Image (tube, rainbow, N blue to C red):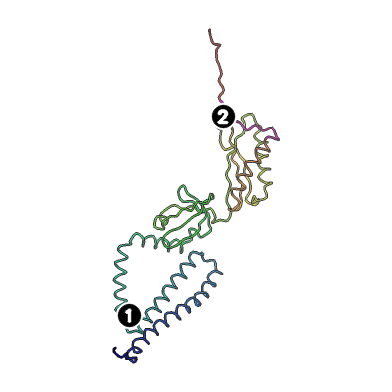
Amino acid sequence: MPKINWNTVLKYALPFGEAILIFVIGHFVILGVLRLPKRALKKTKIDPSLVNLLIKTLNIILHVIILLSALNTIGISTTGLLAALSAVAVGVALALKDSLGNIAGGILLLLSPRFATGDYISVGADEGYVVSIDLLHTTIRTYNNRHITFSNGTLINSTVTNYTWEGVRRVDISFPISYNADVEQAKQTALDVMQAHPLAVADRGFIARVGSYADSAVLLDLRVWCKCEDYWTVYYDTMEQLRVAYAEKGIEIPFNQLDVHLDAPVKE
């Protein structure tokens, strides 16, 4: 049995042990260091999704530095490794050009003020609260708890409506009354209902005007402002309370009907 040369073993084992030690200690140091900017960024008004992106990016960069330091300890040339990684990165970039477009879109969405996590937005026929914005996709949650995911490359070129941007939102209601009803009384009743709602934003004003004339009804256009998160509560409350108020005042809410007039008696 050949004799083990412990000097040779130690000669090669010590650098490997040192490299492992550098990487392990460096890993835990990085985790501790990242807590400081993470706490500081969370106290700012920066979008939470952007904070996560910055922390993840910094985490990757620091781990790459630690890995290169560990590899350098065992004698691997980091210069050659970086050149090889650069060549691989170019190949990956060409293969994933569509994904890179989404990444660029994600960065633009995070850095531009179009919308932020938690905003209520609509894109085409879909609308909901922004749950997350990552490098590739943006996810919204609808009122019926559906999660819809958009690719950032598509979203950056789409028309996005942000309902949360101003903090308040207008509730638009078109309500029918009979042609025989007292329009002024109907308008005042609608104003009373809207003004009495506790979630209405009074300093924005209230509107109750005749909007159009339909086949069987006069349509009143009603406008009341509220906070974005109270939109549907105000909408449904107003619709329900208007019907009760009009019934109490004897104001008729018509249904579609057809009046037939005979100009001459029918001959038998």
Say whether residue 75 is left or right of residue 185: left
Residue 134 horizontal/vertical position (percent): 45, 62
Numbered range of the magenta stretch: 247-257
Amino acid at circle 2: Asn
Up the image or down, 98 lies above or below 204; here it is: below
* Residue in view at x 40 percent, y 55 percent: 154
Specify the farthest residue to the top. 268
Q: Secondary structure at mark 2?
A: loop
Residue 1 horizontal/vertical position (percent): 29, 88
Residue 120 horizontal/vertical position (percent): 53, 54
Magenta stretch, main secondary structure class: loop
Say whether residue 252 is left or right of residue 53: right
Up the image or down, 238 lies above or below 2; here it is: above
Mark 1, residue position: 78
In this view, the residue in front, 13 or 200, is: 13
Q: Is residue 268 magenta?
A: no
